Amino acid sequence: MNTHRTPPPAPSGTGRWHTHDLTLHPDRVVKRFRAVEGPGPYVRERRALTLLGRHAPGVAPTLLSSHAPAHAGDPPTLVMSRLPGTPLTERQLAAWAQTVRTLHAALPPDELARLPLRHGHQRDTVARVRAWYATTPQRALAPTVRAAIRAGMDWLDASAPGAPDAPAGIPPDVPAVFGAGDGDSANYLWDGHRVRAVDFEESGRSDRAYELAEIAEHVSARVPYPFDTAALLRRFPLTPAEATRLRDCRTLLALVWLFLLAHDDPALPRNPPGTAERQARRLCRRLDGTA
């Protein structure tokens, strides 16, 4: 999802604010990370491509080379193979689900146990939402957005994810998986035979419920072309504990997206008019159990 301490400009369904610059060649992609972001995104993506190349070859680009900065302020760089493919449509839901399952199960248990928690997991996200709420001028928001945010914060204060004793990492009653860390559907490419994944800047150890919530609640699931998130989620048999957690994680991430979309610059909008208001209604439906 790639959120920051204060809400950045909201991404559209086909793009996002960027922490990197891409140079596309016929056979390779050069990804230069912005030094201001620090080494985290570079380290996480390099580690993910290395591990996936070893344990699940073909599901992601092949890492060709990496260049850590030689001097402070220099951008770190990854060079990886360029994957052929086109954006997903609903006809590829089964293949998409298979790729997500492959990613989740890619690492042997011992390597997964050593993997750091993904960036932006539950506790970090809850803290970020509370910081946003404390610094967001509520009077500047549309009434429907303001009311939905207030309802969402009330839910968070009473929820399992928002509880003071919520686990810092993965709850003990759900299994750990490898998490790609970003639910943007544009990060999955259909090559005519299979779906493959790109963009692992936020990746790390996670759990299925949180990762599936990332996909289901990402704005790219609805803007500009909606896909059937329920049909996708039905392809993942979950334990009762995971199903309960999925509901909570979806509500939490719906609240995150409301903050992000509410900060779209009206002078330079990145989303269709009314996107924030639609997200406010979506959050309210999640809160009352109708979405």
Image (cartoon, rainbow, N blue to C red):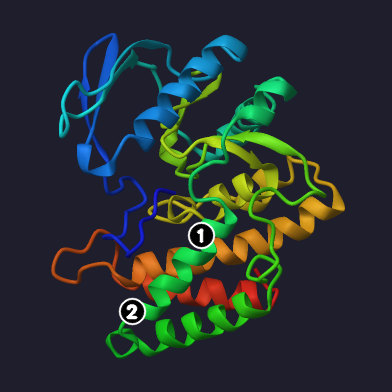
Q: Give percent across and percent down for residue 196.
A: 50, 23
Q: Is residue 197 above or below residue 3?
A: above
Q: Which residue is most to the right?
A: 240
How far apart are the two marked residues, 2 and 1, measured between alpha carbons? 16 Å
Going by the numbered disc 2, the residue's amino acid type is Thr
Residue 70 is drawn in which quadrant?
Answer: top left
Quadrant containing the C terminus is bottom right
- Residue pictured at 28% horizontal, 60% vertical: 8
Q: Nearer the viewer, residue 165 or 171?
A: 165
Q: Secondary structure at mark 2?
A: loop
Q: Is residue 189 above or below residue 208?
A: above
The crowd level at tag 1 (other Cα within 10 Å; few <14, some 14-19, many 20+) is many
- Residue pictured at 47% horizontal, 80% vertical: 149
| 36 left or right of 267 in image | right
Q: Which mark is residue 125?
A: 1
Q: Give percent across and percent down for residue 98.
A: 66, 28
| 148 left or right of 213 in image | left
Residue 72 is drawn in which quadrant?
Answer: top left
Residue 163 is drawn in which quadrant?
Answer: bottom right
Residue corresponding to mark 2: 136
Q: Is residue 212 above or below residue 186?
A: below
Q: Which mark is residue 33?
A: none
Q: Nearer the viewer, residue 45 or 142?
A: 45
